[in-house]
Amino acid sequence: MTSIELPTPHGPARVETHCAPEGRAALLLGHGAGGGIDAPDLVAAARAAREVGVHVALVEQPYRVAGRRAPAPARQLDAAWLAVAEALGSGLFDGLPLVFGGRSSGARVACRTAAAGQAVAVLCLAFPVHPPGRPEKHRLAELDGVEAPVLVVQGDRDPFGRPEAAHHREVVVLPGDHSLKVDPEGVARAVGEWLDRVLRPLD
């Protein structure tokens, strides 16, 4: 594991890299709005990725690096994320396909930036379809706008809702709530199988 800081338009981001012995691709994972990169589902996803030969970069947004709890506006999150992706894609992960991913708010960032960052696939852990109790305020347009293959791993009791499977989009439902901490092995299994399958045509 290596920790580095990378400049972005909104301050430095911190990136924790976990490299596989022979990387076939790289998975960039972002954290939730109020949480960090040590969330159980992110840890499980990172482990599963390495086991199928995928390098992992856990990305800590600049507002977290600066010690702020409140998340930055979406456009700042997206700009910082793309700056990190560009730096890694032309540096440590040069020449490798990039998979964007994250949990909750980080999953939204991954979806919104997938096209601009040329991601070959998108992993969404606990995608927040809508604020709890407010299904009319849904964010499905962010998910629907992704043209690359998408995997959504969602808890069966997630108060933020659950998206449906769709063209290019698979949904795996596991026991648990928005934290996805009840079944980390289930998260790892779903992520590992999906990564291995979607990357096979690119090997």
Image (cartoon, grey):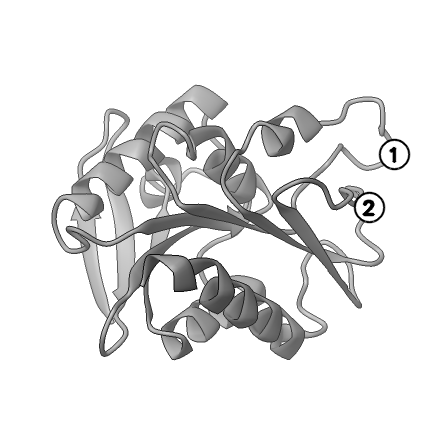
Q: Position of residue 44 (x, y in %)?
A: 52, 71
The residue lying furthest to the left in this view is: 91
- Say few, some or many: other residues with alpha carbon within 10 Å of mark 2 (under 14 / 14 to 19 / 20 or more): some
Residue 113 numbered tag: none
Q: Disc 2 marks which residue?
A: 159
Question: What's the residue type where badge 1 is placed?
Answer: Gly
The residue lying furthest to the front in this view is: 201
Left-right relation of 56 to 156 = left
Residue 97 in sight here: yes
Foreground: 28 or 104? 28
Residue 31 in sight here: no
Q: Position of residue 129 (x, y in %)?
A: 73, 36
Q: Are marks 1 and 2 in contact (CB under 8 Å)?
A: yes
Question: What's the residue type where badge 2 is placed?
Answer: Pro
**Placement of 177 over or under 187, stated as above or below:** above
Q: Disc 1 marks which residue?
A: 133
Say which label, 1 or 2, has the lower sequence index.
Answer: 1
Q: Secondary structure at mark 2?
A: loop
Q: Residue at x 50, y 65 (%)?
A: 197
**Placement of 36 over or under 68, stated as above or below:** below
User: Quadrant location of residue 90?
Assistant: top left
Foreground: 73 or 172? 172
Q: Residue at x 49, y 29 (%)?
A: 112
Left-right relation of 97 to 140 = left
Left-right relation of 188 to 140 = left
User: Quadrant location of residue 21?
Assistant: bottom left
Marks 1 and 2, how far apart at CA: 7 Å
